[in-house]
Image (spheres, rainbow, N blue to C red):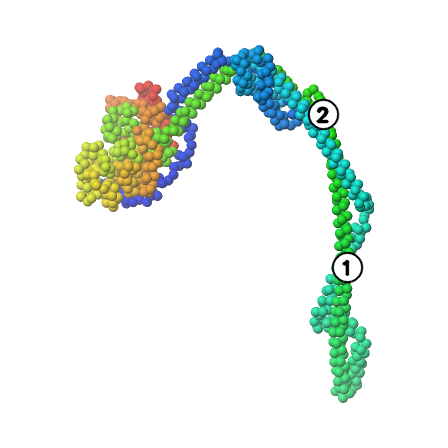
């Protein structure tokens, strides 16, 4: 029966998001980053002997080459300095304008440096007797000028001195007296060539400027003739001084045209307005009304109407409004008003038509006058354009004449300047600043510089070789490699058994038979990291797999199950590797009946689970190998069997096959709560990454990785903890013996009882135990990992390889 309460039990098939880390998740940014300073230091410590060997060999070779060169192959350098003040000659007309830009000087120095190494210049220097007869350097070529020329071209140096206007010319020879002779001869030939070339160049420039002057004078003569002809053809002086009549007339016509356009617009508007006027607008027109009222007939009829109205008013007062005479007057008044209204309407229409016709005639007359005016305006405009073209041509010819005169004067001045320079003794401002002299000490080798440079280069090469070898190594060697390259949390590491000092016969039995060994402590550390990585309900069923065979997955599964059982939990170890079962060999059990029989329904779990020498650990062996292992593991019977197992046990540890060889591991990874991936040190990173990817394809949850068979190399993970761990164990045993002798405390319990509590208080006690060990300042027991996967255990109290085997008195 399980020791856990029913409240913490969870059914199988937990959601994938509840896992510690998804197999599909990318590695952390820190894991995928570049090499840190701690990594570099670790690599340098691991390969310190290689670095020292390469450094020593490189330094020895450097010292040897330097001494041999100084003894048998020294070189003596002769140098001369040439000062280049300006790339142009001095201006005799402006003696103060001698400053030129820094860039111009540097470009000219570079040109002169290339000129010194010109093949023809060097060949001319070799024709002199100074080099041929007075130097041992030339004699070594047996009068072969071409060979000497090639050697001279390769060894002669010419370059500017930075920040100055000096040009350094130098050469190194075996004889200290040859170098200054060769350099001085080359400088003399260079100065001769530069002087002659400059003089010829300036003479040619003077001739070219003279031709330019003659060309400008010919152009000036032609322009003056054209100006004279243009002045004869038109009154150019009058045009330039007084306002021409054409311009005045053009302005007058333009103003008159504007005025005529305004009158035309007014006449057209009035003509169109009276022509489209409605009867209501005619009645309300003031102008038409005034013209109609001025008509004599309408005026007489209006007076007759007013008389009748006055007479009616008078009689109405005297006779009354209904008198016969009053009524007769009313009739006469009505007839007169009707006649007046009709006459007014007739006269209004006649006046409207008359005004319309009048404005029409006036508009057309003004239109004809405007057309005549436009013809005159166009004629005056054309005359003005002709006048402007003549004036523009005249101004352009005058401007060209002035330009040619300036150019002629400029070229004439330049011709005189270059002619004067070409006749001087030094046409350019380049002269020998210092001739080469016999050197006092050899220029090669520079002993101190060569040795220091060789030692430094050897050290850099040694370090680079060490780092390069580490970068080219694609295997997993350290816990940091697992985190960085595989992107998996590290549950713990297991050292290689060859480095173990305790008598561990088989690593699979380390946790059971040698609990005091460092290997057993490493498995207990893996157990502790597993317990604190996630709640128990998220790791009820755990698959232990690897990328390839012989990675140590079975030994990890066995020792993990043993340590969990020693901690007080009911553990079931299941061998799911039908193709190569191993659990029955480790525990000495028969393999005739096991998991395969359970999956095909030949019994219940209790019928096949075998007890071991540990009270809390049961083992379910693989049983006979079925003909179809992958199909059998992919069936629903596996889920039912695991669900039944977690009802009877606290945790189920499944030892599966390698995931890259067969598909059984991937099938199981999709069914369990989590997967532990075992990686063997020096195994390929690519295999581990492919194994992670394979589990990711089935959406399995990877709890973490275990690095197996880690070697104790210099700077390695376990080297500095072996002696400290066993020294700590010896001190603990001596203290127990002392307590037993004086009978102060009860008899000490076994190491297993001290390290692991019983099942009733396993979880809380184990947590308190691990925290107390981590807080112990002098404790070098379990290895504590930081977030980068490196050892973060306290250094005080830990023994290194060089420490004495015996404990110190104060530690005891």
Residue at x 63% of width, y 27% of height: 104
In the rendered image, the vertical position of residue 643 relative to residue 313, given as above or below: above
Percent coordinates x, y for residue 700 in the rendering: 32, 41
Which residue is tagged 2?
Answer: 419
Percent coordinates x, y for residue 718 in the rendering: 33, 26
Residue in the foreground of this view, choosing between 365 and 70: 365
Which residue is tagged 1?
Answer: 372
Q: Quadrant of residue 205?
A: top right
Q: Quadrant of residue 336?
A: bottom right
The furthest residue to the bottom: 324
Mark 1 or mark 2, earlier in chain? 1
Residue at x 71% of width, y 32% of height: 212
Percent coordinates x, y for residue 447 in the rendering: 49, 15
Residue in the foreground of this view, choosing between 25 and 502: 25
Residue at x 26% of width, y 37% of height: 656
As helix, strand or loop, the secondary structure at mark 1 comes to helix
Residue at x 35% of width, y 33% of height: 685
In the rendered image, the vertical position of residue 389 relative to residue 502, given as above or below: below
């Amino acid at each position: 029966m399980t020791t856990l309460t029913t409240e913490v039990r969870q059914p199988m098939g937990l959601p994938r998001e509840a896992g510690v880390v998804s197999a599909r998740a990318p590695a952390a940014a820190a894991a995928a980053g570049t090499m840190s300073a701690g990594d570099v230091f670790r690599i340098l410590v691991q390969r310190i002997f290689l670095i020292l060997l390469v450094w020593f060999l490189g330094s020895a070779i450097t010292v040897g080459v330097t001494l041999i060169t100084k003894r048998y192959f020294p070189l003596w350098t002769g140098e001369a300095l040439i000062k280049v003040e300006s790339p142009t000659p001095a201006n005799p007309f402006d003696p103060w304008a001698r400053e030129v830009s820094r860039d111009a000087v540097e470009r000219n120095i570079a040109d002169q440096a290339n000129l010194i190494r010109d093949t023809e210049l060097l060949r001319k220097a070799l024709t002199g007797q100074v080099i041929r007869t007075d130097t041992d350097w030339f004699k070594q070529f047996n009068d072969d000028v071409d060979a000497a020329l090639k050697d001279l071209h390769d060894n002669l140096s010419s370059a500017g001195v930075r920040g100055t206007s000096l040009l350094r010319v130098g050469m190194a020879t075996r004889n200290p007296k040859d170098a200054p002779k060769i350099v001085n001869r080359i400088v003399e030939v260079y100065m001769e060539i530069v002087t002659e070339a400059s003089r010829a160049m300036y003479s040619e420039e003077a001739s070219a400027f003279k031709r330019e002057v003659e060309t400008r004078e010919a152009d000036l003569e032609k322009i003056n003739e054209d100006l004279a002809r243009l002045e004869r053809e038109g009154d150019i002086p009058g045009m330039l001084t007084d306002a021409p009549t054409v311009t005045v007339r053009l302005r007058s016509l333009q103003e008159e045209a504007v005025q005529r356009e305004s009158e035309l617009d007014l006449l057209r508007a009035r003509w169109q307005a009276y022509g489209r006027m409605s009867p209501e607008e005619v009645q309300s027109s003031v102008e038409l009304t005034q013209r109609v009222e001025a008509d004599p007939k309408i005026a007489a009829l209006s007076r007759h109407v007013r008389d009748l109205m006055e007479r009616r008013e008078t009689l109405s007062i005297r006779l009354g409004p209904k008198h016969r005479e009053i009524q007769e007057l009313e009739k006469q008044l009505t007839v007169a008003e009707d006649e007046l209204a009709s006459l007014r309407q007739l006269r209004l229409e006649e006046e409207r038509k008359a005004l319309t016709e009048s404005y029409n005639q006036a508009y057309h007359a003004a239109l004809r006058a405007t057309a005549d005016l436009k013809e005159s305006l166009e004629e005056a405009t054309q005359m003005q354009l002709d006048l402007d073209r003549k004036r523009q041509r005249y101004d352009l010819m005058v401007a060209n004449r002035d330009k040619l005169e300036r150019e002629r004067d400029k070229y004439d001045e330049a011709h005189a300047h270059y002619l004067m320079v070409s006749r001087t003794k030094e046409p350019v401002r380049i002269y020998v600043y210092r001739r080469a002299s016999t050197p006092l000490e050899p220029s090669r080798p520079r002993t101190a510089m060569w040795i220091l440079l060789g030692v430094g280069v050897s050290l850099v090469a040694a370090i680079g070789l060490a780092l390069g070898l580490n970068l080219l190594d694609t295997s997993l060697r350290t816990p940091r490699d697992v985190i960085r390259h595989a992107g998996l949390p590290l549950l713990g590491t297991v050292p290689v058994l060859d480095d173990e000092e305790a008598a561990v016969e088989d690593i699979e039995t380390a946790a059971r038979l040698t609990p005091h060994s460092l290997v057993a402590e490493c498995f207990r550390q893996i157990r502790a990291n597993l317990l604190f990585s996630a709640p128990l309900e998220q790791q009820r069923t755990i698959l232990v797999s690897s990328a390839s065979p012989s990675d140590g997955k079975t030994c990890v599964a066995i020792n993990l199950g043993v340590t969990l059982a020693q901690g007080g939990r009911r553990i079931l170890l299941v061998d799911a590797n039908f193709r190569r079962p191993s659990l029955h060999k480790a525990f000495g059990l028969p393999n005739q009946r096991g998991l395969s029989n359970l999956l095909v329904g030949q019994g219940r779990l209790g019928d096949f689970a075998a007890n071991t020498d540990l009270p809390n650990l049961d083992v379910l062996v693989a049983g006979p190998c079925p003909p179809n292992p992958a199909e059998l593991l992919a069936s629903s019977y596996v889920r039912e069997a695991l669900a039944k197992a977690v009802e009877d046990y606290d945790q189920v540890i499944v030892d599966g096959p390698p995931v890259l060889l067969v598909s059984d591991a991937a099938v199981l990874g999709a069914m369990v709560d989590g997967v532990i991936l075992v990686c063997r040190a020096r195994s390929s990173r690519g295999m581990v990454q492919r194994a992670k990817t394979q589990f990711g394809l089935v959406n399995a949850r990877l709890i973490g990785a275990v690095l197996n068979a880690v070697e104790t190399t210099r700077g390695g993970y376990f080297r500095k903890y072996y002696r400290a761990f066993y020294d700590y164990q010896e001190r603990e045993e001596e203290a127990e013996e002392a307590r037993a002798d004086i009978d102060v405390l009860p008899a000490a319990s076994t190491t297993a009882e001290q390290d692991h509590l019983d099942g009733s208080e396993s979880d809380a006690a184990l947590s308190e135990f691990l925290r107390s060990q981590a807080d112990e300042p002098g404790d070098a027991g379990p290895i504590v990992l930081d977030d980068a996967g490196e050892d973060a255990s306290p250094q005080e109290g830990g023994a290194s390889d060089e420490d004495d085997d015996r404990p110190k008195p104060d530690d005891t």
